[in-house]
Every structure is written in C-alpha cells, then in structure tokens.
Amino acid sequence: MIRLDNLTKVFDTPKGAVTAADHINMEVPAGEICILLGPSGCGKTTTLKMINRIIRPTSGKVFINDEDTTDLNTQELRRNIGYVIQQIGLFPNMTIEENITVVPKLLGWDKAKYRERARELMDMIALDPDAFLKRYPNELSGGQQQRIGVARALAADPPVMLMDEPFGAIDPINRAVIQDEFLKMQQALKKTIMFVSHDIDEAIKMGDRVAIFRAGRLEQYATPDDLLAAPKDEFVESFLGEDRALKRLNLVKVRDVVSDEIGTVSPGDTLETALARIDDFGYQNAILVVNDRRQPVGLITRAQARTTKGYCRDHFQNVPATVSLDDDLRKVASLMFSNDITWLPCVDEAGRVCGQITQRAMTHHLGSRFRPKEEAPATAASATKE
Amino acid sequence: MPIRSLKGALRIALLIAIFLLGVWSQSSGVIDDFIFYLPDVQFLAVQHLWLTLISGSLAILVAIPLGVVLSRPSMARFAESAMQVLNVGTTIPTLAVLALSMSFLGIGTVPAVFGLFVATLLPITRNTYAGLKGVNPALMEAAAGIGMSPAQRLLRVELPNALYVIFAGIRTALTINVGTVPLAFLIGAGGLGELIFTGIDLYDPVMMLSGAIPTALLAIVVDAIVATTAFLVVPRGVNPSRA
C-alpha cells in the first residue's frame, strides 16, 4: 500500500516558485496498479519521484505499508522500492546478470541465492537465461532491454514498484506485448505499483485505478471504468477524448453482458422446426445450429428456412465468428462490424455455446453506466435506448 | 585489376628501395656509426623511460582524483573555472614550463619530472572530468533509484562507464610525455634528448637520429601498451574496440 499525505513540491526557478505538486492526497491499495496520467508538466512524474526521493518533497508524507518513510534512510528506502524508468537505464558496463543482481548484491544476498534469482527472473520475463545472462545491454533490442529493466526492479522482490513511463520508448507492437506480459506477471506477483503514463489507452489497459493530474493537482482518482463513465469535469472529459465510451469497450468483458438465453437447433432438425424456432425466439435473421456437444456448427437463415425444405445439416451456412467469455467488448464490436451482424454466439473454454451477445445488450450495458450522471435521468435513459 | 597491379608494382618498388637503402647504409658505414651509439641509446632510453614513468604515474595519480572531485555535483560551481585554468596551463609551451620549473627547482631530474608532470596532468584531468560528466543521466537516475550510495554510484557506474574516455586521455598524455622528455635534457635530466640535441649541435645526423628514432619507437610502444591495457580493462559493454 502506498499513501500520499499532502505531498507538495515547490521548485524555485529564476522566474519564481513553481508548484509542481500541490497537496497530493491519495492511496494505492496493496496489489493494485495506479496510473498517474496527465499532460506533460502536470506533476505526475514529480509526484512519483517524491516517493523514492529522487525529488525531495517540500512538505507532506509518504507512507508505504502504513509506515512513514520520512525518517527512513534514503538508500534503504530505495532498495525496497523497484524503480523502472523510460530510458531503461541498464548499466552498459555490466552483463545482464550483473544488472539484474545489483540490488540483491547491495542488500548483501549470498552469491548462490542471487544467481538463482537472476535465472528465475529471466524465466519470468520469458528470456532464455543461458542465452542472455552473459550478454551486455547494448546487444539487446529495446524491448528486451526494458524487460531486463523490469526484472532488475523486481530482483529483490520489493513490495512496491515505481514505473516512470516504462514502455514509452518501445515501438507500439512490442509495447502491447510487454504490457500483456507485465499484467500477467502482476497477477501472480501482486505488487503495489505507481505507474506514470501519458497514454490514456495504456492507463485504461494497465490501471486498476487512474489518477488524472492537471497543473500540479490531482483532478480525479477513480477506476478506469468510473473515470470513463463519469469524468468529473471538462478537463478530464477532454483529456479522455470524445471516444471515451468506445474506450470502455476494452474494460467490459463478454461475461458481463452475455445473455445465456439462446435458441439453437440441431443438425437433425428440419428447416421447418428451425423457422418455428426463429419465430419463437423473435430472431430477425438466423438461428444457430449446434452439435451434440453444443459446439456451434452453422447458421440457418430465415430466408433459407422459409424457402427450402430438408434438414438443417444439409443447408447451414458457416458461423462468421464466435467470442469467448473473457474477450472484451472491443473485440466483439470489431467482429460485429467486420461481419455486418448484430449478434454473436458465445462459447466457453470447451468451445460449447453458452449464450449470445447482441449489439443492443452492449449499448445498453455501456449506456446504463452513463445515465446516473445525466441531469434528466428519464429522458436520457430513453435516449440511450434508442 | 589495374589498381591491384599498380599496388603490386608499388610494393615491389618499395622492397627494392628498402633493399637499396640497406646496401647503401652498409657500404657507407652508417650502420657501424649507429652501432657505435648503441650503448648510449640503451642507457639513455632507460633514463628516458624512467622520466616518463615517474612523471606519468604522478600525473595519473593526481589527475584522476582531481577529475573525479571536479565532476561532483557539489563542485559544479568551481569545476568550469578550474578546467579553464588547466586549459590555460596547456597553452604554455612545455619548454617554457621546464624553464620555469628550472628557475624554481634548479637543474636535474626533479624539475624535469615536475615540468613533465604539469604537461601530462591536463589531458588526463580533462578526459576524466569529461568522461564522468558524459555518463548518461538516465544511468545516474537508475543507479540512485535502486539505492546505490554516492560512492557505489561512482565506483560501479560512473567510473566504469567513463573508463574508455579516461584511458584515451592517459594515452594522449603519455604519448606527449614520451615526446617531451627529450626537452628535459636541456635542464640536465638526461634521456634520449642528450643524443638529439648534441647531434644537432655537432651537426652529426647519425647521433641525432640515434636519439630521435628510439624516441619515436618508445612513443609508439607506450601508446600500444596503454591501448592494450584499455582494451583489457574497460568492460566489454562500454568498450567500442570490443563491441
């Protein structure tokens, strides 16, 4: 847990005093990632760097796991906080192994233990220890270097990590990969992380909570979903962008929206039965054909069911796409748009049909979170339903 | 093809020229003249190297700590002015430095070593300072952020990363040093300058060359030794010649 209590930094510049961080109060619960987000010069990096005293606070306190860090020795404090910076900052004079084991050595671990730890960390970041440990940083790609940067920060297993735009200098494709890897690691490690970013999409993807900064002040501190659904003021709203409802698609899983009511037919049913089912369930266009194990086989369209006679097994069309319960709505929307359809069958881990997701249900789900903030709830509700 | 044959022709011409030079030097007795000076060359070369060794090691011992001290953030206010003083120091010709040190310390080895020390000090100090200042600030932030003390930062991060530049300074300084030692003869410290200057005064080219050629060879050997040391000592990751 990290708690900031009235943390303030005033810089004396030739042009007068500049308040870079103005009485910041916030708390990051243990095991969560908190993203500090804002335009450049908003004080997010200053706030982060006051936690490990790279920048000395003018006033205020930092608590880590309820312990006031003000009286701790600076070096001791820093050795117990993992630190990752945008420029990576691997020591080019040291091998990868030496880089990773710097902190354990500072803490006086014995050799066998820290060498073992280095191999363990390499496995964790999915780089082959035998191939990489003896190499030097300049022999690695940017993405690999930053993985090592993360490993170095994790080496002594600190409870808290500070990350200053860690993936900002990495190309977009590699960045997405590293973000995913990092989130996967975090699920197991459960570190308390403060993470500076200027990328709203990164913040939504990575953050359990997002703190929006503006001109040295903490504007809004909320979960990404709350933030997107209910921005506090115009600044936050404009910072999040006009497509903020679309950004929420990333945050909602199919599981949250799926309806388990889905009509199906089996290959052995006749097209007449299929037509009757389509009408029973009130479907517009088609009905899903599933086999004995309830795996999707194909679609029978209404037009086909009406004009043709025979069994479903002889007349079905291919299923354009299915989604699984853990996919996010962004993928669902994309599949719907690319296939020009308004619903998709959902399948579970075994590939069995377990429900359906409709465009209507998606817009309803997203709209319902916006409604409470509207001025006139009734009209707004009906407007979003249209 | 024409170029390659031209090169081949040149190479053959060169070999013929060297052969003719050998024939000429043997027939005119120059080689015997050189051999006549051999014992002098041996004695003076050792003296020469001692002057370089003593003044050079003193300069390294003083210059590196000086460069380190000047590069500390707390010294930032004085560092640039100090470097300016050292820069002005180098513009004074070495001969003048030797003359000045003679007027204070008399003649002999001590004023010569002092003069050479002063002449060698600057390149090493300047490169140490520049090398340390040139260390990527991100490395310094990372080093501080993971909890290294200032001394650990200096020893484990700053110096190793500046080492290549520091060695370049040592290399320049020692090569200049070897080339300057002949002047030390003028204030009575010996060295190969004895043969060079006496040869000039006596209008004896063979004597002069038996001082000048070993001086040049010594400079090349010292340069090679420092270069090899740098190659071996500077960590592979920050060593451009081992990349």
Image (spheres, helix red, strand yellow):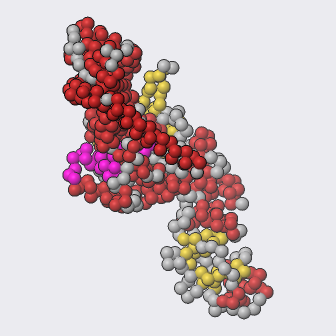
Q: Position of residue B220 (x, y in %)?
A: 34, 33
- Asked if residue A217 lies left or right of residue A98, the reply is right
Closer-to-camera residue (A113/B114):
B114
The residue range painted magenta reads: A87-111
Q: Which image quarter: residue A365?
A: bottom right
User: From this viewpoint, which residue is outermost toward the front?
Assistant: B27
- Vertical placement of B70 versus B92: above or below? below
Look at 57% across and 73% down and name the residue there.
A346
* Residue B195 painted magenta: no
Q: Is residue B138 above or below residue A132?
A: above
Give the residue at x 68% y 57%: A384
Tell me if A203 is positioned left or right of B187 in this view: right
| Nearer to me, B1 or A264 | B1
Of residues A189 and B26, the one drawn nearer to the viewer in this rendering: B26
Whether residue B90 is visible, yes or no, is: yes
**Where's residue B29, x and y in %?**
31, 29
Q: Which residue in the rendered view is the most extreme toward the right?
A: A307
Q: Quadrant of the C terminus of chain A?
A: bottom right
Determine the image quadrant of residue B179.
top left
Q: Is residue A80 left or right of residue A292?
A: left
**Residue A312, image x, y percentages:** 68, 88
Query: At 26% across and 30% down in the image, what residue appears?
Result: B35
Q: Position of residue A25 (x, y in %)?
A: 42, 38
Residue pictured at 31% horizontal, 59% vertical: A119
Does the stretch in magenta take in A97?
Answer: yes
Looking at the picture, tell me which residue is in the foreground, B214 or A222. Answer: B214
